[in-house]
Amino acid sequence: MTEDFSTSRRAFLALAAAGGAAAALPATEARAQMVPTNARIVIIGAGAAGTAFANRMVRRLEGAQITIIDPRAEHLYQPGLSLVAAGLKPASYVVSQTTDWLPRDVTLITERVAAVDPEVQTVSTEGGQTLEYDYLIVAPGLILDHDAIEGFSLDMVGQNGIGALYAGPEYAARTWTAAARFAEEGGRGVFTRPETEMKCAGAPLKHAFLIDDRLRRAGNRGNAEIAYFAPQTALFGVPIVAERVRMLFGDRGIAHTYQRTLRAVDADRKIATFTDADGLSHEEPYDYLHLIPPQRAPEFVVQSGLAWADRWTDQGWVDCDMATLRHNRYANIWALGDVAGVPKGKTAASVKWQVPVVEDHLIAAIEGREGTATYDGYTSCPMITRIGRAMLIEFDYHNNLVPSFPGLIAPLEELWISWLMKEVALKATYNAMLRGQA
Amino acid sequence: MEELTLETMIAVFEEMFGAGLFWALVAAAVVVTLGWIYVLIRDRTLGMRQFLVAQLFMPVGAVLAIWFVMAVTNSHLSDIGGPVDVIIFLGIAAMGAVGSAILVYVIERLVLRRRPAE
């Protein structure tokens, strides 16, 4: 019996060892072969796109000189701002350090870019440094033009019923201060979105849905009116989604008005002024106002001649091919993320799909061949419709829905699983993307 | 999602829990599972009395698993909105139930050293 017992134990240990070896397998999986080069690659911006790209370059290239330029010490997980502004997460949920994510072999310059000279292939910083590059990745994100709203300044956020969740983690937290008060007291909530292209066009809708839910949970929905104003003629850029949101707004009693662009705020009188398609002014009183400013490319993009000359001329997005993200006039420049002048895709999900495409073309350029990968405008928006439910909306340039889990997760249904993904899996996936692993 | 490989999944889970906690959880699950296989091999029988007690813990494990997921995700039972939600809900409950049954059985046979009644 004792003999049998020890034999079993040996077999058991062998099994355990085999299990351990199997668990270690993925880590030692063979990677794509490293490409030797002495190319100088400059990446403008250490946000989602720049950081993910730097990490992937380090894994693919041997001997490349990679420099990343970003003045901001803090990295922001921007998809979390909606949760902060609804009191579901603290401001710290979205904040980490830029240097936490960057690979060791990359040089970080903590300065703002002043100009790019695409002819002589240099980037100069506001601190006076000039960097020469062989390949340039333009991924500085975008500028929130708060000054464009007359009478508004960021120090007003959180007081007198004013919220502005896009402005950053502290402002998102202050937005919740104002919104929480609205949820407690009721009144008239005015929700807006800008006329320009914008980051995550779902976020203004999510905020309206979440604050509606907060009012209901506080037992105050009957004391409140919610009005949503959009400069466009639909609630969302993808028609089938716009219709679905319109129905949900109807269900929740959220009124919507098209062709209204926010122009001015009078915080003392609590009046928001909009203009319509004919330029006529409309005054809307509010007890809570959610404000999202117009959004534009950083000034250097336009000044350096990188922007489209005939499209989005007031916004300055980079003139690039929508499938390869390669600059249409300078073959060694690519745009990534918010700044790219493509019809859709100012989200982290877009970045996740754009980065491997640009990686393919840049490596191909180094090897003297043509890249083959293309980006078809994929983006994803977990459209939160209340605390605990969301619609997992994914679409492309052609306004087609492109669900990741067809037949399993219905894109236009309010589901708990979609909420779970937003709450649990999204930040983890984002972080894995930053490290170049997803 | 573009590519859902095992490597991507592991990277995502590492980010979700932190690499240390994730691998500690994996190790704990592996240890308990191996412990279960070990007592099965050692005893060459399933101790029915202990198995019965372990089964009694299944509803407890199911409820605990559901409660845990709801608590960490700001969710409520009323958020279950479609068939896939019910499947996920039952899946979480089943994992909690089976996990707790295995854990309780291993504790009984390995730690409390209760031998099967011959």
Image (cartoon, coloured by chain):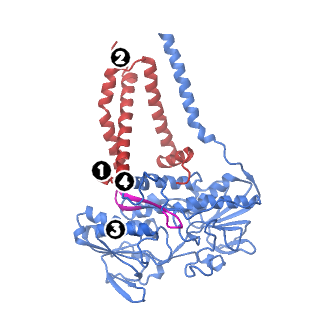
Disc 1 and disc 3: Cα gap in Å?
24 Å
Residue position for label 3: A247
Instruction: Specify whether A11 is left or right of A63.
Output: left
Instruction: Write down the colour of chain A.
Output: blue
Q: CA distance from mark 2 to mark 4?
A: 44 Å
Which marked residue is nearer to the observer: mark 1 or mark 2?
1
Residue type at tag 3: Met
Compared to residue B58, the image places residue A402 above or below, namely below
Q: Nearer the viewer, mark 2 or mark 3?
A: 3
Q: Are marks 1 and 2 on the same chain?
A: yes
Q: Which residue is mark 2?
A: B116
Q: Which residue is mark 1?
A: B77
Same chain for the residues under marks 1 and 3 in the image: no
Residue stretch rendered in magenta on the structure: A383-400
Instruction: Give the residue type at disc 1.
Output: Leu
Whole-percent x, y for residue B27 in the image: 49, 35
**Circle 2 chain:** B
What amino acid is found at the position of numbered circle 4 in the picture? Answer: Trp
Which badge, 4 or 3, comes first in the chain's sequence?
3
